[in-house]
Image (tube, helix red, strand yellow):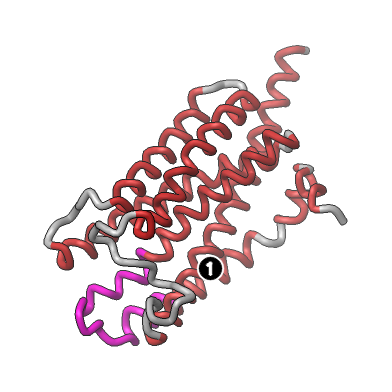
Amino acid sequence: MSFWEYANPRKFMETTDNLVGPAFVLAGVCLAVGLIWGFFFTPDDFRQGSTVKIIYIHVPAAMMAINIWAMMLVTSLVWLIRRHHVSALAAKAAAPVGVTMTLIALFTGAVWGQPMWGTWWEWDPRLTSFLILFLFYLGYMALWSAIEDPDTAADLTAILCMVGSVFAILSRYAVNFWNQGLHQGASLSLDKEENISNVFWLPLLVSIAGFFLLFIALVFLRTRSEIRLRRIHALEMKERMA
């Protein structure tokens, strides 16, 4: 069985029909376990106090915001190279989820930063690049809405996605590129000295899994809706030409 078989809309619809429900259920379980565990059964940090617990929302949302854009980049490139409509529609479907994750990350970051830094916002390299990524998400969605021809919209949004990927990379590695800035380093790291304590790390992993599964469920659901809308549009065009 070839991976490219799932680029066929009918095959995609048949395959995901039985996956959307379980994905939502698993996402709900992971989110409930991760957030309850993290907020109610972990100690306060010796420096940040109880404010550190916002990590269970902020970090997963920020990770998903960046990785969703990466997913959109890959599916956009597939569209440009292979002209598979499902990949373009999957990128379109992922954008509203990505912009929501970015907004959650920006809001929780401000709530977290205010007691730590004494300000709701700082023009820190990572924060600034993350804000620009948020604007790229909005621009991507607006471009899809502004162009009537879906193939032309897919082409132009794919190009925009490639440009915006620069800021997705900066959002992830800005702390490494610039030593200055208030933002802390990565919460999850292969370096044991940089990684957070296991008491915070384990529920954080469960929360991240919940956010990831929620994204998968939402993208499947929204892509299926986009395929149905494309079919309706094709039928309407056929009736007009008849």
Taking the image as drawn, is residue 104 in sight?
no
Q: The N terminus is located in which quarter?
A: bottom right
Q: Give the magenta range.
A: 34-58
| Horizontal side of residue 116 vs 189, given as left or right | left
**Residue placed furthest toward the left:** 118
On the question of residue 159 being in view, the answer is yes
Q: Residue at x 25, y 57 (%)?
A: 180
Name the spot of residue 205 as percent of width and height, x first: 48, 75
Mark 1: which amino acid? Ala
Q: Position of residue 185 (x, y in %)?
A: 34, 67
The outermost residue toward the top is 241
**Residue under numbered circle 1:** 27
Comparing 194 with 231, the one in front is 194
Residue at point 45%, 30% (across, down): 142
Rendered position, 192 above or below 96:
below
Q: Tell me the quarter of the image containing the C terminus.
A: top right
Compared with 57, 170 (above or below) is above
Q: Is residue 242 left or right of residue 57?
A: right
Res 40 quadrant in image: bottom left
Q: Most prominent secondary structure in the magenta stretch?
A: helix
